[in-house]
Image (cartoon, rainbow, N blue to C red):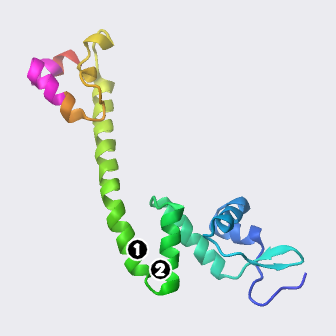
Amino acid sequence: MERMGTATLTIGEVAAAVGVNASAVRYYERRGVMPLPERASGQRRYGPDAIARLRTIRVAQQVGLSLAEITQLLAGARDGKSVEVLRQLAERKLPDVEALIKRAQAMKEWLELAADCRCASLDVCDLFATDDPSNLAAAETVRVEREGIARRRQRCR
């Protein structure tokens, strides 16, 4: 099979190099995140820059950027403003990540308490003293006010 210019990689080769499925590459093309490739005998042909772009997309998705945000990032790269766009996206995303970490920590604390729970039933368990189990601080306040710290620890053990 004749290879064209620098666009010599098949969709399978590009996808395998980055660890994604070929269907993901086609999806990114449809969404405009990946440029449409050259074609040879009806087959997609990619240059080595496609691998770098797919790696950028994959890393950006792993840190929680949406395809719309990735499109902004890549557009910034074309305009020579990629670092500025990256900073703006990171600044917008950080509060969400901090909130997620806070929620995950509250979940972990609740689950640790639940793992040690020795209550007779859920009806008497202080872990269910609030409607929002991720808000352990509110549940803790209710428990402290209602029973005192020592009593709470006795009831859940």
- Distance of label 1 from label 2 (alpha carbons): 8 Å
Please tell me whether residue 141 belongs to the stretch shown in magenta.
Answer: yes
Q: Is residue 134 left or right of residue 73?
A: left
Q: Locate residue 81, reporting x and y percent.
A: 43, 83
Element marked by disc 2: helix
Q: Residue at x 52, y 78 (%)?
A: 75
Q: Residue at x 55, y 68 (%)?
A: 57
Q: Residue at x 11, y 18 (%)?
A: 146
Quarter placement of the C terminus = top left
Q: Locate residue 104, reporting x and y percent.
A: 34, 43
Can you tell which mark lies on residue 29?
Answer: none
Extreme residue in the bottom direction: 5
Element marked by disc 1: helix
Q: Dot 2 corresponds to which residue? A: 76
Q: How many marks?
A: 2
Residue toward you, 132 or 154: 132
Q: Residue at x 29, y 31 (%)?
A: 110
106 over 148 or under it: above or below: below
Can you tell which mark lies on residue 86?
Answer: 1
Q: Is residue 157 visible?
A: no
Q: Locate residue 62, reporting x and y percent.
A: 49, 60
Task: Give, as a single range, the part of the protein colored magenta.
Answer: 140-152
Q: Quadrant of residue 130?
A: top left
Q: Quadrant of residue 31?
A: bottom right
Q: Residues within 10 Å of mark 2 (few under 14, many from 20)?
A: some
Marks 1 and 2: CB-CB under 8 Å? yes
Q: Is residue 10 left or right of residue 53?
A: right
123 over 10 or under it: above or below: above
Quarter placement of the N terminus = bottom right
Extreme residue in the top direction: 120
Q: Quadrant of residue 2?
A: bottom right
Residue toward you, 130 or 56: 130
